[in-house]
Image: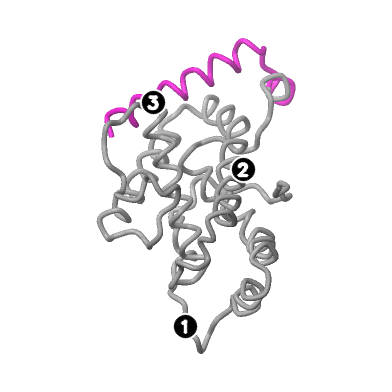
Amino acid sequence: MFEKQPSSQPDPFDPQPHAKEEGVFSVSDDKEWFIRQAFESDPQKGVELLFRKYYNVLCSHAVRFVYSKELAQDLVGELFSTFLHKEIHRQIRSSFRAYLFSAVRFESLKYLQREFNRETELSSQVEEGLPSILPTPEESIEYDELYRKIEQVIQSLSPAVQRVFILNRFEGRKYHEIAQELLLSPKTVEAHMTKALRALRQVLKDY
């Protein structure tokens, strides 16, 4: 339903990943007024406008948690599909932007929970598909802690491993493309990726 949008590459080491995402809806300064009006007449049109406005920045945000450009795109695309079919816009009392960033972090944690078999409750609203409210202060701390841990792991990798990892996971490059660009053998690229993913999995399991 929603096609992937071209985007500039995210900076995986931005020290303030949430600096521009927060904010609560204000009637006197509502930058989303046009989108809200669209939802009043045609919810699908409203979601399409949200998608065009926020898809790229949400993908850049999601990739910081799930360390895969393609997975981040799939996650964000599914988020918008669920947003439409469950008529989430009727539940939102904050800005759409604040809600969508919260939902991306929520879905990212759900993915990591499944991947690493974590037996823990992320929210009482897991069964609803998306959170219906903004995160609690405790959940926000957990999101930020998770981001910092992922960032620390990536920065702790050797320069060669880090370069291969970023090209593959953040830029979506194939192993043979990375090998050609960096003048490495495909087996070396694969070995670097194995090392990077092993380090991430260990830290996330501990977390």
Q: How far apart are marks 3 and 2 (CA)?
A: 21 Å
* Callout 1 crowding tier (Cα within 10 Å): few <14, some 14–19, many ≥20: few
Whole-percent x, y for residue 61 in the image = 52, 50
| Residue pointed to by mark 3 | 201
Other residues around mark 2 within 10 Å, as few (<14) / some (14–19) / many (≥20): many
Q: Where is residue 51 in the image (x, y as percent from the top left)?
A: 65, 58
Q: In this view, does 34 lie to the left or right of 153?
A: right
166 or 119, nearer to the observer = 119
Q: What residue type is labelled 1?
A: Ser
What kind of element bears circle 1? loop
Expressed as whole percent of the image width and height from the top left, the position of residue 86 reads 53, 55
Instruction: Tell me which numbered mark, 1 or 3, is placed earlier along the sequence.
Output: 1
Cα–Cα span, label 1 and label 2: 30 Å
**Of the residues shown, which amino acid type is indicated by label 3?**
Arg
Q: Find residue 26 and name its label.
A: 1
Q: Residue at label 2? A: 73
In magenta, the rendered stretch is 179-207
As measured in the structure, the alpha-carbon distance from the residue carrying label 1 to the one carrying label 3 is 41 Å
**In front: 176, or 60?**
60
Q: Nearer the viewer, mark 3 or mark 2?
A: 2
In the rendered image, the quadrant that contains the C terminus is top left
Residue at disc 2, secondary structure: helix
The disc labelled 2 sits on which kind of residue? Gln
